[in-house]
Image: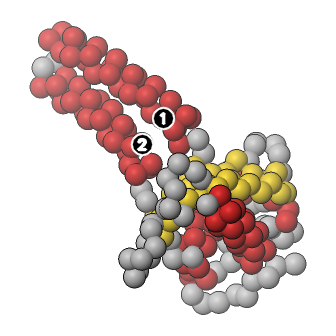
Amino acid sequence: MSNTVPTDDASEKPIKINKWETNALKNALDDACKKYFKEALNFTEDYKLMDGRLYISLIACLFSGFGLIYDWLNPFPKSRSTLIICVIAYFILMGILTVYMQFIERGRFYAGKLVDKTGIDPISRCTISSKLKKYDDKYDLTLEYNDGTNKATNSLQNISKSVGNYFDENGVLCYDRFTSDVKKMYDQARTSERKVK
């Protein structure tokens, strides 16, 4: 059974996916989590993590574009050494991008900060990552939370549930069920961060 009510507003339409496609399941849950943190908790997304990936890709594209233009202006025999340098640089940058995504991003899809409008409280930060293996129904969601008072410690909370808890038999996301689990995880992270003090 779905807890959704059909509306005319495109942003409020229930999310319906092919429930047998793992990537669609993971992306729908990740997007719902982002939406909850942005709209319900008023977090502002911090794009630094994603910007690193974009900068590496931009530099790789500049190398390949330069090689293409140089080869067009100076046909092959003259451009041989430049093409070799551009191709090697491109593959090195793609290797760096793979390492960056594997070891630095590590499945993180959201980094956000909550700024106190009065300026009294420090900036709270949270980073969310998820994992859903290809033929598995267990969706792992991990939240790292720091309330800004102690930069050395982060509260780490994790939930691991079947995607069947969050989607009905037609593949429609039950947003309220999912966000109630995310809210519990967020509240636990905040209380455990206070206990550390």
Q: Position of residue 53 (x, y in %)?
A: 42, 42
- Left or right: where does residue 32 sit relative to residue 162? left
Give 180 or 170, whichever is nearer the viewer.
Answer: 180
Q: Does any portion of residue 106 appear in the rendered image?
A: yes
Looking at the image, which residue is at 64% across and 80% down? 13
Q: Position of residue 79 (x, y in %)?
A: 18, 15
Of pointers 2 and 1, the one earlier in the residue sequence: 2
Label 2: few (<14), some (14–19) or many (≥20) C-alpha neighbours in 10 Å: some
State the mark number for residue 100. Answer: 1
Q: Is residue 138 above or below residue 85?
A: below
Quadrant (top left, top right, bottom left, bottom right) of the N terminus: bottom right
Disc 2 residue type (three-letter) = Arg
Looking at the image, which residue is at 48% across and 70% down? 114
Disc 1 residue type (three-letter) = Tyr
Q: Is residue 166 above or below residue 82?
A: below
- Left or right: where does residue 4 sit relative to residue 46? right
Q: Position of residue 131 (x, y in %)?
A: 70, 47
Q: Which residue is mark 2?
A: 53
Secondary structure at numbered mark 2 = helix
Give 99 or 191, whichever is nearer the viewer.
Answer: 191
Report the colour scheme: secondary structure
Q: Is residue 126 above or below residue 131?
A: below
Label 1: few (<14), some (14–19) or many (≥20) C-alpha neighbours in 10 Å: some
- Left or right: where does residue 110 sit relative to residue 80? right
Circles 2 and 1, Cβ within 8 Å, touching? The answer is yes
Q: Position of residue 9 (x, y in %)?
A: 57, 87
Secondary structure at numbered mark 1 = helix
The span from disc 2 to disc 1 (Cα, nearest Å) is: 7 Å
Looking at the image, which residue is at 68% across and 63% down? 195
Quadrant (top left, top right, bottom left, bottom right) of the C terminus: bottom right
Residue 106: image quadrant is top right
Residue 69: image quadrant is top left
